Image (cartoon, helix red, strand yellow):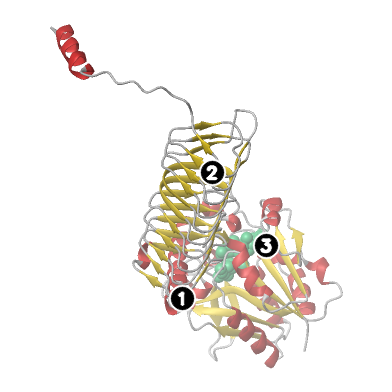
């Protein structure tokens, strides 16, 4: 079997996006546009993968975590043919086939790429390109064929005559070509066209003139070859991608109460029998367990959530871990570094940051837990605040097992409360408390009978 190489074209600016961000870096389903096609191509295990970059080259390179990818810089974007030539150096000792993909065609499927390569090899073609039938072919290069149905050339829309523009078969922008043919044909491409660019599709006519065999393969479902050239197309694709991700999870046994308002990014996983309410966004590398309930209005990024967790209405979770059976919210905010043990309860208006809570611990109301480690079965009363910041540094608080922290307590870090400590309500605790102790603040309580009535009388008198 011949070797396979991949060239991904991602150097263009994407003028039609009207953006400072290079087009291929615009996010789609939570990851950079170019990485969709790149990851799909990588599943064919190519021997060489080269991404051609130019506009925002450094940023594009930084956005890619795949160490196997080589980078070719196209200094000036003189066209797709010129872009492929920029990768030539990486294919010096390469004798196989080169698969060429566009960074702005994200939905292309692995099986389509495999079919294209198979077709190409079975026919011993010099080059094979993917085509599609579109009801509205606007913007794409059109496939020209002779009477016998054989391809003769590709004409770009801007260069096409009116009758040519009526042609509905278009160039999908996905090609496979013998390396030797590809680079030889490309040196014959000129920029004598309306855009003054070196067109990659021109290798078709060049190859045919040279007596080479050029093949085409038509995709069944044209949706997978749709290119993104504008923000409107990006939004439309985001939507269709979102629908197919939602469909995948519903087929896998997840209930989505309102798929139209459920946003699940590509890298997310969800267990069976989890029920997800409206307005939920699951982002990044979030993993939700089985049998969970997400009531709705949840914004969750990079969170690991165990089985049978209940996220009540309106919660924000970022870069945190929640073990099985926990109940969070409504209106709770779990910030990075938070790790909640099994069956922990976090109630309304509770914020946690770098907070580690042991199994069965509860903080049900109006509380800030920052830079704190809490043992198991501890109860944090309403209005408890860990004072972790003095304006210069952050300090840690440690709280043991089975501790009762009374309501309206301020815990001034650095601080440690031993196991089984009782903190009386409305305490300000500044010093470590040993296990089993009670801590309280001495305060005098005074009662003045009849005070309210007297006050009201005085105030009324003032008004007149
Ligand atoms: C291209 C094809 C067209 C096809 C369509 C499919 C050409 C001339 N036309 O048109 O026949 O129907 O794709 O989507 O190839 N790029 C570079 N360097 C450049 C120019 C472009 O890297 O100098 C990259 C872009 O970043 C993009 C890809 O190549 O990822 C395609 O370029 P684009 O300008 O979007 O081509 P289309 O006009 O869509
Ligand atoms: Ca394009």
Q: Position of residue 251 (x, y in %)?
A: 43, 79
Q: Closest to the observer: 1 or 193?
A: 1
The answer to which image quadrant residue 392 occupies is top right
- Mark 3 or 2, nearer chain start: 3
- Distance between mark 2 and mark 1 Cα atoms: 41 Å
Q: Which residue is mark 3?
A: 191
Determine if residue 364 is in view.
yes
Closest to the camera, between mark 2 and mark 1, is 2
429 lies above or below 64? above
Closest to the camera, between mark 1 and mark 3, is 1
User: Element at badge 2?
Assistant: loop
Q: Position of residue 117 (x, y in %)?
A: 67, 84
- Distance between mark 3 and mark 2 Cα atoms: 80 Å
Residue beneath the point at 78% across and 86% down:
2
Q: Position of residue 267 (x, y in %)?
A: 56, 66
Tag 2: Cα neighbours inside 10 Å, few (<14), some, or many (≥20)?
many
Q: Which residue is mark 2?
A: 421
- Mark 2 or 1, nearer chain start: 1
Disc number at residue 364?
none
**Quarter of the figure with the C terminus:** top left
Q: Position of 40 compared to 261: left or right?
A: right
Q: Which residue is mark 1?
A: 272
Furthest toward the left, the residue is: 464
């Amino acid at each position: 079997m011949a070797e396979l190489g991949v060239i991904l074209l991602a150097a263009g600016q994407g003028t039609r996006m009207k953006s400072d961000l290079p087009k291929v870096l615009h996010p789609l389903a939570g990851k950079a546009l170019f990485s969709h096609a790149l990851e799909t191509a990588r599943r064919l295990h190519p021997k060489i993968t080269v991404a051609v970059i130019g506009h925002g080259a450094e940023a594009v390179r930084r956005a890619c975590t795949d160490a196997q990818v080589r980078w070719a810089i196209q200094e000036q974007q003189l066209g797709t043919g010129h872009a492929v030539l920029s990768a030539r150096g990486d294919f010096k000792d390469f004798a196989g086939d080169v698969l060429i993909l566009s960074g702005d065609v994200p939905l292309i499927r692995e099986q389509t790429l495999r079919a294209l390569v198979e077709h190409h090899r079975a026919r011993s073609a010099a080059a094979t390109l993917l085509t599609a039938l579109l009801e509205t072919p606007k913007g794409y290069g059109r496939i020209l064929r002779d009477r016998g149905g054989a391809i003769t050339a590709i004409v770009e829309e801007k260069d096409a005559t009116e009758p040519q523009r009526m042609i509905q078969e278009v160039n999908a922008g996905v090609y496979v070509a013998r390396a030797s043919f590809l680079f030889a044909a490309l040196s014959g491409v000129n920029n004598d066209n309306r855009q003054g660019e070196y067109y990659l599709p021109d290798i078709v006519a060049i190859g045919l003139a040279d007596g080479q065999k050029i093949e085409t393969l038509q995709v069944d479902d044209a949706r997978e070859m749709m290119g993104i050239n504008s923000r409107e197309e990006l939004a439309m694709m985001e939507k269709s991608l979102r629908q197919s991700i939602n469909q995948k999870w519903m087929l896998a046994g997840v209930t989505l109460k309102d798929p139209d308002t459920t946003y699940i990014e590509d890298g997310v996983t969800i267990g069976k029998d989890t029920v997800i309410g409206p307005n939920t966004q699951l982002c990044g590398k979030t993993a939700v367990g089985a049998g969970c309930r997400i009531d709705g209005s949840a914004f969750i990024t990079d969170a690991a959530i165990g089985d049978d967790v209940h996220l009540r209405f309106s919660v924000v979770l970022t870069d945190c871990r929640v073990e099985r059976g926990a109940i969070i919210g409504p209106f709770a905010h779990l910030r990075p570094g938070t790790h909640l043990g099994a069956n922990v309860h976090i109630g309304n208006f509770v914020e946690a940051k770098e907070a580690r809570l042991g199994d069965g611990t509860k903080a049900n109301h109006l509380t800030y837990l920052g830079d704190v480690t809490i043992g198991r079965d501890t109860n944090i009363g309403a209005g408890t605040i860990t004072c972790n910041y003095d304006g210069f540094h952050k300090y840690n608080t440690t709280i043991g097992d089975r501790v009762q922290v009374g309501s309206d307590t301020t815990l001034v870090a650095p601080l440690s409360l031993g196991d089984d400590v009782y903190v009386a309500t409305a305490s300000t605790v500044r010093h470590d408390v040993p296990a089993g102790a009670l801590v309280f603040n001495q305060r005098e309580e005074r009662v003045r009978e009849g005070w309210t009535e007297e006050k009201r009388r005085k105030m009324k008198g003032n008004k007149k």
